[in-house]
Each structure stands twice: as C-alpha cells, then as structure tokens.
Image (cartoon, coloured by chain):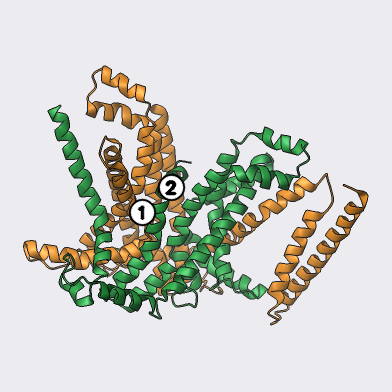
Chain colours: A orange, B green
Amino acid sequence: MSGQSTAGRKVLSLILLIAGGCLLVGALVLDFMGSPLTFRGTMLIIGAIGIIIGAYLFPTVKHHRKIINILFLFPLLFTFAVTVIIPLVLGVFYSLTDWNGIRFNNFLGLENYTSMFKEPAFIWSILITILFVVFNMVLVNVVGFLLALLCTSNLKGLGFFRASYFLPNLIGGIVLGYIWQFVFNNVLTEITEKISGNQASILSTTSTAFAGIIVVYIWQYAGYIMLIYITGLTQVPKDVLEASQIDGANRIETLFKIKIPMIASTITICTFLTLTSAFKQFDVNMALTNGSGSVADFMGSYLTNGTQMLALNIYNTAISKDNYAMGQAKAVFFFIILAVVSLVQVRISNKKEVEM
Amino acid sequence: MKKKNVISVVVTVVAVIVAVYTLFPFYLVLMNSFKNANDIVASPVSFTGVNVTQWITNLSNVINNSNFNFWYAFGTSLAITVISLILLALFGSMAAWVICRNKTKWSTAIYMTFIASMIIPFQVVMLPLISTFRDVGEFIGVSMLQSIPGIVFAYCGFGGAMTVFILTGFIKNIPYELEEAANIDGCSPEGIFFRVIFPLLKPVITTVTILNGMWIWNDYLLPSLMLGQNGRVKTLPVAVQAFVGSYVKQWDLILSAALLAIVPMIIIFLFAQKQIMHGMVEGAIK
C-alpha cells in the first residue's frame, strides 16, 4: 500500500469518525432535550454508520483485527442486549414495584410475590401446567418413539409416512388451535351424536378440554420428536444389532436391552425439548380454549380458568387485567421454575447416561 | 415367513391409521373451504355442498376482507421473516466467528451469556421489552413498536443466542490452517471471513435459517404484543387471530383463512422436505 493512499484513507476515516460522532452527539442532545424534530432518528443512524465505516477504514495494521472483532460482534450483541438483557433486568426490578406497564410509583418488595400465591386461579394454573408437562413428556416421547420405530422398519412408502407425521409441526399454534376447535366442536360432536346421541363438545367440560389440549399437542409435536428418535435409532451400530441377533435375542430384547440404552442421549434431548416446550405452551392453549373451563371448588373458590396454563395466565394477568407488575412477578417465578426444572432434568439425565 | 408377513401387514395398517389421523384435520380444512357456512355445520365430514365456485367465493371473501387483508399480512410476514433471517445469518456467523477464533475472557463470557440466555422464557422479558422499545422509539424518534424494523430488531436479539450456538459448533471444526494460509497470502481479517469462512458455512446456515424461519413465520406472541391486535401492521398469525375474533363461528371464513395461512408453509415443505426435516433434527441435537 503506497504512502499516499494510506494518508488519504486516514483523512477519510477521520472525517467519517468526526462527522459521525458529531451527528451522533447532536442527535443525542436533541433527544435529551425532548426535541420534536423527526429527523433526529435518521441523524442518529447515519452518525452510527459513519463511525462504523470510519473505524473500519482506519489505517492500522496492529489494531485492525481488534476493530474488526468489535465491529463483527456489535450488531448481534447490541440487539441481544436491548431485547433480552435489559428487559430481563428491568423485569426482575419491575416485579418488585407497582409498575403499570409505563411507570411505577412505589417499591413494594416481595408483595407481588406473596399475593400471587394467595390467588387460587394462579395456583390452579401452576398445578395444571405441571400436570400438562408430565403428561406430555411421557406421551409425546412414547408416541414419538413408537412412530420412529415404525419409520425405521422396512415399511413401504416410508418417506410419505414420515413427512405426513411431521407435517403438523409446520403449522403455527394459533392456526392449528382454531382448526382443532373446529374438529372438536363440529366434527367430533357429529360423530359422537351418531354413536351415542351425545352432542356435547369435549371442549365444554374442563377435564375433557384439558385432554383435548394434550391430544392437539401430541398431534403437533410427536412428529418432530419422532424425527430426532429416527436419527438416534439409525446411529445404533449395525454390528451390535447383528451380534445380538446371533446371540439369539428376539426383537423385544433387542429393543429394550440394546436400542433404548444406546440412544440414551437422544432420550435426554427429547425429554428436555418436550419439557421446556410444554411448559411454555401458549398458542394452542389460547386458540383452543383460551383458558376457559369452570372448576366448582378449588381452595374454597369457584374458578373460570380451568384450562389456563401458566404462560396464558401471565399474559392475561398483564394484558387483559392490566396488572403489569403482578404479571411480571408471575413471569419471574415462571422463569425460576423453568430454570430449576431444566437444570435438574439435565443433571439427572447426565447421571443416568454415565451409569448406562 | 408367514409370521413376518403378518407383522408387516399390521405395521402398515398402523402406519396408515396414524397418517389418516395426522392428515385428517388438513383434509377437513381443505374440503370445508369448498362449502358454504350452512353445509359446513350441517355435515362437516361429508362431501355434501362441495363446489368450486363456493371455494372461490370463500377465498375472495377472506382475501378482500378488510380485517384480514391477506396479501398485506402475507407480505408483512414474508418481509419480516426474510429480513430477519438474512440479518441473523450474517450477524450470527460474524459473531460466532469472532467468538470462536478469539479465546479471550471476553469471548468466553459472551458465549456463556448467549448459552445461558437460551433458557429464558419469552414471558419474562415480554412486558419490559414493550416498554423498553416504546421508550427507545420515543427517544430516537423512530417507532420501534408497530413497525417492521422494530420487530426485525427484536428477532435478531431473540434468535441471536441459538444462531451463535449452532454456528460456533460448526466453525470450531473448520481447520484454522485455512485462515492462516489466507492471512499469509495477505488477506485481511474481514476478507478471510467473507471469502474463506462464510462460503463454508452454507450447510449450517441452512439449518439455522430453517429453525429460525419456522419459528419467526409462525410466531404469534411477539408480533401480537409489538404490533398490537388491531394495529396498522399485521403478520399472518396476528391477522388470523384478529379475523377469527371478529367472525366467531363463521367457519366458512375461518377455515378458508386457515387454509390460506397454512398453504405457504406446506408448499415450502413440499419443495424442501429433506432440508427442513434434516435442519430441525440438526438444530435439536446440537
């Protein structure tokens, strides 16, 4: 690189840095003064771009790598900090105040946390979420595993079956929630009416509606879990299977004594996935029942949120009932449970894998 | 021999029954979108009332409905998904490369923060996120809520952790000698990344793009909170929710809307079936 072009680059880089800096500072000053000028946003962005290009062009051999590192990390770290880290910290803080979604007036300490446990509807949501998670972890894994066995046998048209089992997973929870609402309310009732004369939809009673959510969830998720099990099963070495056959093991023995122990790590992944996703279930719950369902007597009160799981309870507390601080406190509690459960689950599975 | 035949027949029968079960709802949506409201309620399973003119009427009713505004919602969803995916792939691989190739305290700390953040449920950040975005938008004078740039920004933030996690796993296995050789040939660090490393990332970027794409395209909660239920800008899932809310029990309209919402995904799946299934598994195993 010739001396002249280096000097030229240096001047250009400095001009960009200084001009960018001026624009940035100017825009920030306008912002802090509460200026109504609408071009201040554009100014801020142009200033930032100027600084970035200036820094990139800065002619230095020694620090160039460092500058590139920072420039490369910046976009993702910046968006991550603004969307995850800052809201998380603020969220934990807001849960200790009487925040209304915009500002807060008083610091309440743990008051939100103590009062949410006095709310029977919330306790009910916790209980049915746990029930839902347990049911799903077992059922989705069993169904997914059986489907995987089916799809690794020498069945004709395997590709078609595999794709059709996976298909529901492509559809968003809101849309399929409504589709299933139609199935339960219109199609299934017609069938049951013909068979038994009973015309009631299963979504109209709490316990059957809860079962309905589980059915939809399995329908949506089992195909995905199946794919992971298929990958696990095809990685079981062929010679091990052959050896067991020579030793006279029948199909069932091979399954329980060889295949299942050898895919222990896949089982861990799948239980983890079903656990966390069932915990966070929101879309289907909202579209299918929107949490409705009556409970005659729970902790001495009548509930109308029979099928409302935690995530939906948090949403409704904050958005529908406009109680942001309480919703946030519940969300922090939700986060803590989720973190503890996942850590415990990973720990237990790791131990089991080592033993096997 | 005979026993084997019996088993394979049983297996096939089971496979078919399960396939009927998984595909039945799709069949119902498709078939009933050919009927008028009365026929749907009268006999949802049978073919009574199916006709093509009715289908076209239903679809045009939904597409031209001012509450649903299908093409607009579809375009919004497409724009948000595509821009987010491009930015995530680019920024994600840039960040993952820096994290991978610099074994300093900082890069380890950043990596660990990304990993730990994957356990954070959306619910715990959603409420402060809205207020933060509102404040930032007011502060800089560019609306972050109810705008496509704002939601793309949020997806880059939320998708970043998983993207970096999968990409670092891949970049780790690219031999460092490649970069050294390029360096000796006088290639700048950014040149090494864009000319040597980035082209090698194609398979893993496909995986990441599929995982993020499925999630962003189908996501309901984030856009519904950021864009609002009845805001100016709507994504497809938000539009479906708003539409169903205003036409309770009008199944001809609802099912046609559902059909329109699921068709794009199914078309993509038919073309990229292998990549999608492979990508979903890869993402989970890592």
Q: Is residue A272 above or below residue B127?
A: above
Answer few, some or many: residues within 10 Å of disc 2's Cα (few below 14, many 20 plus, some between 14 and 19): many
Q: Which residue is mark 2?
A: B280
Q: Chain of mark 2?
A: B
Q: Residue at x 57, y 68 (%)?
A: B150
Placement of the N terminus of chain B among the 4 image quadrants: top left
Q: Quadrant of residue B152?
A: bottom right
Q: Is residue A116 above or below residue B233?
A: above
Residue A96 can be seen, yes or no: no
- Looking at the rendered structure, the secondary structure element under dot 1 is helix
Residue B233 rendering spot, x and y as whole percentages: 50, 74
B76 vs B27, left or right, is right
**What amino acid is labelled 1 in the image?**
Asn
Front residue (pair A278, A150): A150
Front residue (pair A104, A241): A241
Q: Residue at x 40, y 45 (%)?
A: A272
- Marks 2 and 1: in contact by CB < 8 Å? yes
A343 vs A30, left or right, is left
Q: Which residue is mark 1?
A: A169
Residue B218 can be seen, yes or no: yes
